[in-house]
Image (tube, rainbow, N blue to C red):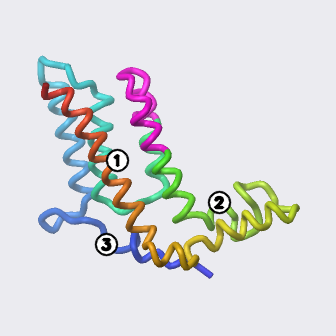
Amino acid sequence: MTPDFDFFLEPTFEVFGFPISLIFTLFTMFLLFLYFHRKDKSLSLNTSLLCSLLILFSFARWHPQFILWIIPFMLCDAYVHNRRLLCNVFFVVVVTISLTWFGFYFSTWGHSFFFFSNYTPTLQNLSLTLLNLHSNEFYKILRLDILLQSLFVGVVLFYLYYILRQRVT
């Protein structure tokens, strides 16, 4: 009863035959080098690493641990640079993707609802809904996986534009 997630289990994006993880590592090292060897520190280290992670997330396939990687940088960016609304939109999209693609994880294969045992009929129905969301006809007709991935990439690119626009102007 494993969900069919061919969309994000396909091979990840490659640049000139190199996996995106290698490109990301080299890009991050390049950003660190630039940060420590330039006199103008107008773009903070936090913002530089946030941009690097956002670029990785927009070109790589979705994985749930992305949330954990980016939370510290997003919180710092939200409160230091006052981008709370943009961060909130980002997190709503991320939570929506996580619930629709990984609902089976939050339902513990139909035995709980967000890790609370489903002893009541309401919790059992909610748990089974999360478990079977990917096989829903509405989900399949709309291709909700591709739609949500596109929405995520759009929000990430807008966030990058917003950060870099303030840097350029």
Compare residues 35 and 13 and report the one nearer the observer: 13
Q: Amino acid at mark 2?
A: Phe
Q: Which residues are magenta?
A: 72-91
**Image x and y of residue 94, in percent:** 47, 50
- Up-down relation of residue 35 to residue 30 (above or below): above
Q: Compared with residue 43, is residue 25 higher up or lower down, i.e. above or below?
A: below
Q: Which mark is residue 11?
A: 3
Does 75 appear in magenta? yes
Secondary structure of residue under mark 2:
helix
Which residue reaches farthest bottom? 1
Direction from residue 103 to residue 15 in the image, left or right: left
Task: Please give the residue where the numbered disc 1 appears in the rendered image.
Answer: 155
Residue 35 on image: x %, y %? 19, 27
Q: Secondary structure at mark 1?
A: helix
C-beta proximity under 8 Å, tags 3 and 1 = no
Q: Which residue is mark 2?
A: 106
Q: Nearer the viewer, residue 69 or 6?
A: 6
Residue at 15% across, 68% down: 17
> Gap between marks 1 and 2, in whole Å?
24 Å
Residue type at numbered disc 3: Pro
Instruction: Give the side of residue 136 with respect to residue 111, left or right.
Output: left
Q: Main secondary structure of the magenta part?
A: helix
Badge 1 density bin: few <14, some 14–19, many ≥20, Cα 10 Å: some
Q: Earlier in the sequence, mark 1 or mark 2?
A: 2
Q: Where residue 86 sits in the image (x, y, percent)?
A: 39, 36
Which residue is rendered at x = 33% and y = 29% of the image? 46
- Residue drawn where x is 47% and y is 47% of the image: 67
The kind of residue tagged 1 is: Val
Which quadrant, please, contains the N terminus? Answer: bottom right
Which image quadrant: the C terminus? top left
| Residue 22, placed above or below residue 86 | below
Q: Which of these two is toward me, 142 or 42?
A: 142
